[in-house]
Image (cartoon, helix red, strand yellow):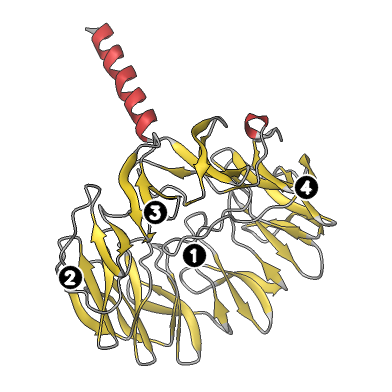
Amino acid sequence: MKTKHLLLLVLLQSIFSINAQELALVRDNDLYGYINNSGEYAIKPQFQKASSFSGEYASVLQGEKWGLIDTSGEWVLQPEYDKIKSFNSGYVLVLKNDQWNYIDASGEILKTPVNEKYYDFNNGVAFYRSNKKYGLLGTDGKLVLEPTYDVIKPFNNGYARVRNGDNWGMINKKGDVFIPLEYAELGNYNSKGIGARKGDSFGVVLNNKFNIISGADKIWDFTDDSDLTYARSKKKVGFVNNKGEWVIQPIYKKVRAFNNGLAPVTDNKLWGYINEKGEKVIDYIYRDAETFSTSGLAPVKEKKLWGFINKTGKTVIPSEYIITAGGLSLFSKNSIKGFHNGLARVKKGKEWGFLDEEGNPLGGKWFQNVELFVNTSQ
């Protein structure tokens, strides 16, 4: 019996590993393909253009037409479209014969009331515009929300900011009002709190209560990595909690978010790191600095190039690289700089690649370009 249970566990782990594979788009010899997180080609470079995977599928250009491939590189939708967007929520937007349509992975067209502009699905809904107002469209092709708002911003963690006139509020994916439209400014949803402005006051919306921050003239979004976010007062920046209280006084010229217990800050031209008590942990010696990853490494800039330090300030990887966040997604704040899941996207000379946490290039390979790894499971 124990042997059967062990075999079942191994089988389940294998299935999970296959379903949860990560692939990164790479460009080599002017062709695009995909590597796995061992640095091996999952799909060899063979396409003139391509996008990163969105779930199980990626759009690629062959000849002059676009199609959709799966993680084995097999065609899901043959290359017969003039344009093709990202697959999401069971559908992808395609352009053929000057007509946009939503189609599923079998190529079947979704019938909808859309007659103005088509918007991508994201987590089960798409924007729907009619007579300069916006609503929401469901994956059944029917309206979830009639055109109601002047503006709907992309959903973030299940909620979207909406505006009518000068007033902002927030709705869920069913179109229900989550925060009334009574704010002059409103940040993205986070369960820890939402930065907002009402009249001349800045504060944090929590459980539909507006907690004013004394003296603040700007506030940034909370992240999942800390109970603090940053706010500005009289041209200086500090950190506040979701009650609107200053936890670290606004004394810095610039800061970035807390992650792994530390935040990059600068009061002049050089950057260092503080803890959530406001105590200096790493000296102000860097030209620039980014947040720590969960593995405990952070990108820091010395002169013109970037390296990586640990939480004691020790250099782990020398400053020999250029870093950027990689490709951006309309529906998520894809601003990863440095290590994510044990790999960092970097440029050395004119080539791009990934470093492991010991500073070794993934698979010993460098490319014309690479994009961030994405999870291909649905």
Mark 1 vs mark 3, CA separation in Å: 38 Å
Q: Quadrant of residue 171?
A: bottom left
N-term-proximal mark, 4 vs 2 = 2
- Of callouts 1 and 3, which one flags the residue occurring earlier in the amino acid sequence? 3
Say whether residue 199 is visible.
Answer: yes
Q: Earlier in the sequence, mark 1 or mark 2?
A: 2
Which numbered mark, 1 or 2, is in the foreground of this view?
2
Frontmost of labels 1 and 3 is: 3
Q: CA distance from mark 1 to mark 4?
A: 35 Å
Q: CA distance from mark 3 to mark 2?
A: 30 Å
Characterize the local packing of mark 1: few (<14), some (14-19) or many (20 or more) Cα atoms within 10 angstroms. many
Identify the residue at image location x=67%, y=84%. 234
Q: Secondary structure at mark 1?
A: loop
**Residue matched to label 2:** 144
- In this view, the residue in front, 86 or 158, is 86
Mark closest to the chain's N terminus, 3 or 2: 3
Indicate the position of residue 235 as horizontal and vertical percent values.
69, 82
Q: Residues within 10 Å of mark 4 (few under 14, many from 20)?
A: few
Circle 4 residue: 349
Q: Which mark is residue 222?
A: 1
- Name the kind of residue labelled 3 in the image: Trp
At 43% across and 70% down in the image, what residue appears?
Answer: 188
- Using a 10 Å C-alpha cutoff, classify the residue at mark 2 as few (fewer than 14 neighbours), some (14 to 19) or many (20 or more): many
- Can the viewer see residue 378 in this picture? no
